[in-house]
Amino acid sequence: MDFTAALSNSERAKVSMQVDSLNKSLHNGKTVSKSLGKNDFLKILITQLSYQDPTKPMEDKEFISQMAQFSSLEQMTNMSKGFANLKGMLMQSNALNLLGKNVEIITGDKAVTGVVEEISGKDHPQLKVGGRYYNFSDVEKIISKGASL
């Protein structure tokens, strides 16, 4: 059940602080993550090397394979962040190109046509048309100035 709709902003902030405090006390100040990152991978690798049998050391092939996996994981993480940034910049650039142009926006069953007055937002830009904001992704058509509305 969601109680946040019935709470004021100050009450929500107070409850949020109390929940954070409780979570920190339960986890001794450590944040809990549900996914493994590169630091977790390194900890596992170091533990594995620390507890290996000295009479049967890890083969070079296994170690090299694990290091290659670690390197690939780090590069994929960096690429993912880079693509997310690029996507945000492209969306913002495309939205800015519509400033002052006539557009048709589809929202639900209704079509709104008008001039883009303002752009707001970075990763998920919104266009102000006719005094209301609409998602950039809802733009259906861009209409040239000579065309009739």
Image (cartoon, grey):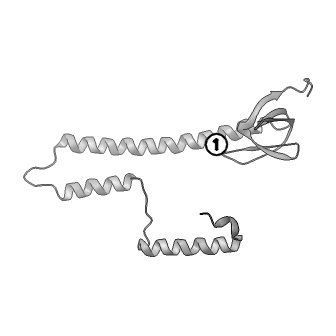
Label 1 amino acid? Gly
State how many labels appear: 1
Tell me the residue at 90%/23% (across/down).
147
Determine whether the residue tagged by mark 1 lies in a helix, strand or loop: helix
Query: Quadrant where the N terminus lies?
Result: bottom right
In the picture, the quarter occupied by the C terminus is top right
**Who is closer to the viewer here, 28 or 40?**
28
Residue extending farthest to the top is 147
Tell me where residue 67 sits by quadrant.
top left
Residue 34, percent across and down?
42, 56
Image position, residue 123 (x, y; %): 66, 45
Task: Tell me what residue is drawn at x 43 percent, y 63 percent.
Answer: 32
Residue under label 1, please give it: 88
The reply, left or right, for residue 65 in relation to residue 93 is left
User: Residue at the spot x=82%, y=38% of the render?
Assistant: 99
Q: In which quarter of the image is residue 88?
A: top right
**For residue 49, above or below residue 111:** below
- Measured as percent of width and height from the top left, residue 13 is found at 64, 72
Give left or right: position of 111 versus 35.
right
Residue at image position (31%, 57%) is 43
- Compared to residue 73, the image places residue 149 above or below, namely above
> Residue 146 in the image: x percent, y percent?
91, 23
Question: Farthest residue in the left direction?
Answer: 55
